[in-house]
Amino acid sequence: MRSSVPALLFLVVSFAACKTQGEAADPGAADKAPSAIPASPAPAPVTPAADPAQPPKPPAPTPVKVLTPELKASILAAMRLNRQAFQETAVLARYGEKRPPATHPAFVACDLPRTSAGEPASQYPAAKARTTKRVYPEARIVDCLDTRGGLDGTRAKPLAQHYYCGLPGFSPDIRGCFTFQLRLSSVSTERSAIDDDGYLPDGTRLKLRKAWNFLGPDPAKVPDPGAAFAFCATDGRPHEITNAVTKKPIPVATIHPTPTRPTCWIAQTQAPIFQGLLGGVIDLPIADQVAILKEYYECSRIKGKVSNTRFKALCEIDVSVFK
């Protein structure tokens, strides 16, 4: 079963938010002008007709800089839902959490298959893929956290990076589809990555290199996040797929004959949090961001129960770069 995904407007550019600055008019300019003999009123300025091809831009959102109990609850709920939906069973057991039921509306609407035991499975069409457990390992999260995070090469704020790294890179291709379309060429010339657990239609398991187009006309600017998100929510299939072993191209429709819509999951469950954190609109004090992450990971409880390397990545957050 598939359903349409509501159209979403991504509000700003990247984790670090390439901000547009405007100049405010001087409110005292009229008082500073010299007095003069009254003259005939000037003709009213002609207002140009609106270009029907260019819809008016919405007003810039007001930054959210105060952590309310409601906002904190929404952020934690989104992060926990992502963990419960996609991460390893052992991680869920660590936190006393359970999988959402296979009948969860977003699983159904976004065609996110579950095994007979309710575990996550691959989105590849092959029956073997859709009946084989496939989780998003916590080790991949740690790898993701080892990067700068910002699509424009800047350091992502802690909460945005940890939230984003908690989303799967492949199957569903949430980070794969969205990220590879937005990176600056100066950050990474790579527009592809290898999925170690790909499947051919006959159920053959193999490594697939997936590539997504660079959407922006200017390689020096982060492309339009709204266009990238919309594509990933309505289609999302890679633009190129290659057998990672033989290097031979495979027609995309052979692997994914229908849209995969990886960010449909975001649209259905947490669009305001995704847009707010990654767009820089939710811009909380660093101390509040760290406090949310420590509560999410339950750092005081897991110390000594995970490796030192993992604990450092999850809980020992270096905030000096933001001071």
Image (cartoon, rainbow, N blue to C red):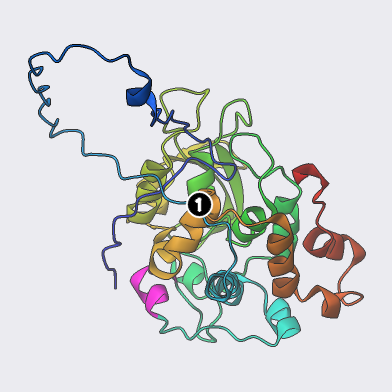
User: What's drawn in magenta, residue-wise?
Assistant: 105-112
Figure quadrant of residue 305: bottom right
Name the image quarter holding the N terminus.
bottom left
Give the total number of marks visible in the rendering. Answer: 1
Q: Residues within 10 Å of mark 1 (few under 14, many from 20)?
A: few
Q: Is residue 3 left or right of residue 17?
A: left
Residue 173 visible at all: no
Figure quadrant of residue 44: top left
Image x and y of residue 147, in percent: 72, 44
Prevailing secondary structure of the magenta residues: helix
Residue at left offset 49%, top offset 47%: 178
- Residue 251, placed above or below residue 175: above
Residue at left offset 38%, top offset 20%: 32
Closer to the camera in the image, 236 or 194: 236
Residue 223 visible at all: yes
> Which element carries disc 1, helix, strand or loop?
loop
Tell whether position 16 is magenta: no
Q: Is residue 128 left or right of residue 302?
A: left
Q: Is residue 252 left or right of residue 80?
A: left
Residue at left offset 76%, top offset 70%: 294
Closer to the camera in the image, 234 or 14: 14
Residue at left offset 67%, top offset 58%: 162
Closer to the camera in the image, 71 or 233: 71
Image x and y of residue 312, in percent: 86, 60
Image x and y of residue 143, in percent: 74, 53
Name the image quarter holding the C terminus.
top right
Figure quadrant of residue 80: bottom right
Image x and y of residue 94, in percent: 75, 82
Under mark 1, the amino acid is Pro
Q: Which residue is mark 1?
A: 63
